[in-house]
Amino acid sequence: MNAISHYHASARTFDIPRVQVLLIFSRTLIYVTLILIMIVQAFPLVWMILTSIKNQREVFSSFLPTQIDLSNFQRIWNAIDLPRHLINSLYVTSLTVIIVVIVATLAGYVFARFHFRGKDALFYLFIGAMMIPGQAILIPMFQFLKSIGLLNTLTGLSFSYLGGAVAFSIFLMRSFFMSLPRELGDAGRIDGCGEFGVFWYVYLPLARPGVATVVIIQSMGIWNEFMFSNTFISSPGSKTIQAALFQAVGRYATDYAALSSGLILALIPIVTIYLVLQKQFVEGLTAGALKG
């Protein structure tokens, strides 16, 4: 027995340092991998920010600017009438997101809390819309907008985004409403609320992280969308910011500093939305991770 105890004691004293070494090695490997991913992800943004404040001679000759040159922002601001295109993008994004939030919140609640014939088939029909790539509906959507007189209009462009955006948002909101306890709704009914009152006063305030997640994801996707906006809008004055910057690439192909300045200005609204809603957004992602 003494020999066996001595053997196990020796094994433990040998294994513990080895386990610690493996833990330190694995953690170091994870940190190094994350740092490399962060560098790869952040480098284009850092390069764009630094380029936007360089003069034209320093764009490729040095990584850091010798002095800050803010004239690039003024040049691109005036050259392509940037305020008009920012307002166009803001209108399209706001209109689409407002409609998506209203439809997805109501539909997600119905799919999560009500039982009716054909509910699953109807829900999977919405989910199927998420699988259709935008390129496949480009020509049909073009013909549809033309037939109803909304081609080359910002409102028509907004409607073209609704299909995929609504389908994904319904899927997201349904998951959030399903994660909330049914007992809360029963308590609301006991207090005298009708079905809409239960939705409005009980469940909707608790679903704010889900609504914030929908707003951020859809705002980023619609603000940065290019294919539909460049196809459905032909009037130069009605172009969104992404399509306008694409046209500027042709006219200012060698002025990388001005183009980078335009891209930085185009990022500001969407970054602002994220910063305002980031707390709710993180709560929404955490709730989704914990509740599946």
Image (tube, rainbow, N blue to C red):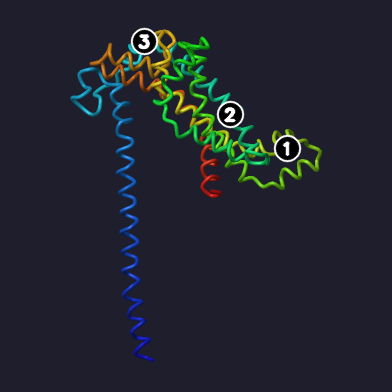
Circle number at residue 101: 2
**Residue in the foreground of this view, choosing between 257 and 245:** 245
x and y, in percent, of residue 91 in the image: 51, 17
How crowded is the residue under tag 1: few (<14 C-alpha within 10 Å), some, or many (20+)? some
Q: Which amino acid does label 3 sit on?
A: Ile
x and y, in percent, of residue 108 in the image: 61, 36
In the figure, 83 relative to 278: above or below?
Answer: above
Mark 3 to mark 2: distance in Å?
A: 32 Å
How crowded is the residue under tag 2: few (<14 C-alpha within 10 Å), some, or many (20+)? many
Please count the marks in the image: 3
**Residue in the foreground of this view, choosing between 57 and 139:** 139
Q: Of label 1 and label 2, which has the lower sequence position?
A: 2
| Residue in the image at 67% along x and 41% along y | 113
Mark 1 to mark 2: distance in Å?
A: 18 Å
The answer to whether residue 263 is left or right of residue 158 is: left
Residue at image mark 3: 80
Q: Of label 3 and label 2, which has the lower sequence position?
A: 3
Q: What element carries label 2?
A: helix
In the figure, 93 relative to 131: above or below?
Answer: above
Residue at image mark 1: 198
Tell me, yes or no, whether the two marked residues, 1 and 2, touch with CB atoms within 8 Å: no
- Residue most extreme to the bottom: 1
Q: Is mark 1 on a helix, strand or loop?
A: helix
In the figure, 271 relative to 243: above or below?
Answer: below
| Residue in the image at 20% along x and 18% along y | 57
| Residue in the image at 31% along x and 48% along y | 33
Q: Which amino acid does label 1 sit on?
A: Val
Dividing the picture into quadrants, the one containing residue 110 is: top right
Q: What residue type is labelled 2?
A: Val
x and y, in percent, of residue 122 in the image: 59, 35
